[in-house]
Amino acid sequence: MVVKATIDGIPVEVEYGTTILDAARSVQVKIPTLCKHPDLPASAACGICIVRVKGNNKMLRACCTPLEDGMEIITNDPEIVEVRRTVLELILSNHPDECLICGRNNNCELQRFAADFGIREERYSKFLRDIPADVSTGTIELHPQKCILCGRCVEVCQEVQDVWALSFLERGFNTRISPAGDIELNESPCVKCGQCSAHCPTGAIFEKDDTSKVWEALRDADKYCVVQIAPAVRVAIGEAFGYPYGTNLTKKLYALLRRLGFRAVFDTSFGADLTVMEEASEFVKRFAEGRGPLPLITTCCPSWVDFMEKFYTDMIEHFSSAKSPHEMLGVLSKTYYAEKNSIPPEKIFMVSIMPCTSKKYEITRSDEMFASGYADIDVVLTTRELARMIKQAGIDFNNLADEEPDHILGDYTGAGVIFGATGGVMEAALRTAYFFISGENLKEVEFKQVRGLDGVKECEVDVAGRGVRVAVAHGLSNVEFILNKVRRAKEKGEDLPYHFIEVMACPGGCVGGGGQPYGVTDELRIARARGLYEDDEGRIRYAHENPYIKKLYEEFLGEPLGEKSHHLLHTKYTPRPVYVR
């Protein structure tokens, strides 16, 4: 059913149920809003999106009011502008004036609207709540004084991620966000995914900044600083410098990182190729040889690992023991690379540039993250932190010439780079698993059934005459749907619904990670993923055909799942306290 109306005199036709806010956008009318995010349902919390409807004395909130047939809507007049300004002034009366030292300075939605509405004085007395910051996780920081109670973080944590680490406490003027029970965030069910920070419009939640550690290391002549970039970073960093969404800046990043002072520049996609070798071998061992329980669950996501260790401990036996790609590359930098270049491993300082806040947690998650005798990774920076470092360094990033990586741990295949998109890990692993089982490469290399932004993707893939039932889920609420199907089948003694499962905590996978540039929407996720798939198409497309991976096994590791590989490239999982959500 189509609804017809006018917005600021412009005729509009939309599907029944479309909100006034979305209908206005369809005719290029932008109604301001602080609480509404495209990923989330409307909460109508802020009140800035008010509009007037002819014949109605009330001002309606555009984000939650469906367009009705015959409506004549006015989105802008002097009274509406004054009401919006007053709402902003009231919000600012409960907000600290700390813009210059805030993690969201120059990238804050509240700050932008205050500028747009020309707020130059404080008409209302300040009422600031004395609530301390929570920095307990070491990954994301919670600054409740800067919260405007829009509800985005609560909504994404509870409904999209189904983690329930954040909630509203108290009422009225005392309302605030906090973990339930008013405990520290690190003691809550929080899995450090950072989706709360990615959706927060202000500086109430943001990533822990570790750039000073990296600057200090780069200044230390006794340290041999090396760096790696994750697949999803290359297609998102450009957003901070005016590039179109999804622009692949891989080779420009290599040049930039050398300009910053890193002695060697590696690529996490090489680590992804290595992960494929180990995980595909695990799958073949379980599926083709019957040695180990099915389904095999694969991922490179530490938030999912944390989630599993808290809520799905019965699935630990199904989980691939392979470390994530950046951890694999980290340990190799302090063993294989150090040996080949006669560098004392204790001098190597490895920095990972990741799209993810939970990678900061992962590097100290267990003893296996120190397999070389040293930390696999010394510091993790998010894409946002790297963007700040580039600006601090005064480097003209846009005009840098392309450069190559250090090939020994930098050359990668298309299979490695698509790890950054949901379904990419599964697709890459299946390409190599097929070869391991059949002895030949796939003719149709792309598994388009596992691509895209559907929360759950299920299909059956023919692998050398045998049907492999696979599932891909992203966003933790969708992950639970998949795992509960496996649980029910196991409890009832029925055939398992899947043989192979990929899970990612963040919607869209790593391209939508909690450390990526702000303002993520499905449009951005699609564009970033497209950049990765285009990179895949122009490369060797099988991890097992990467010549540097072959050389690594010949010279150093021996074979996938071998003794040395197991020691350096694999990890264990530990059940953690049971949380009730």
Image (cartoon, rainbow, N blue to C red):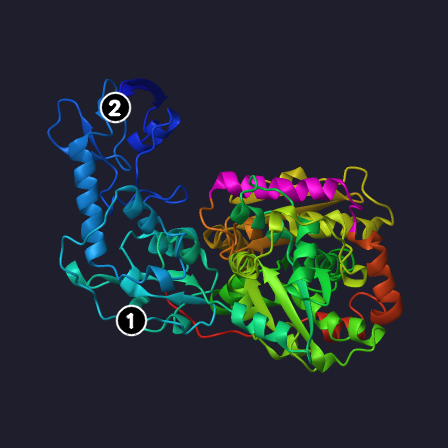
Q: Would residue 535 be counted in the magenta stretch?
A: yes
Say what secondary structure mark 1 lies in. helix
Position of 505 with respect to 562 (left or right) is left
- Label annotation for residue 68: 2
How far apart in space, not on screen, are marks 2 and 1 (Cα)? 43 Å
Q: Position of residue 449 (x, y in %)?
A: 64, 39
Q: Nearer the viewer, residue 276 or 37?
A: 37
Q: Amino acid at mark 1?
A: Asp
61, above or below 328, in the image: above
Span shown in magenta:
521-542
Q: Return the residue at label 1.
A: 182
Q: Amino acid at mark 2?
A: Glu
54, above or below 435, in the image: above
450, above or below 121, in the image: above
Q: Nearer the viewer, residue 334 or 556?
A: 334
- Tally the numbered discs: 2
Quadrant location, the C terminus: bottom left
Task: Tell me the residue at 75%/62% (across/down).
Answer: 278
Task: Tell me the residue at 76%/50% (across/down).
Answer: 413
Position of 41 with respect to 423 (left or right) is left
Of callouts 2 and 1, the N-terminal one: 2
198, above or below 328, in the image: above
10 Å crowding of disc 2: few (<14), some (14-19), many (20+): some
Say what secondary structure mark 2 lies in. loop
Q: Name the quadrant containing residue 340.
A: bottom right
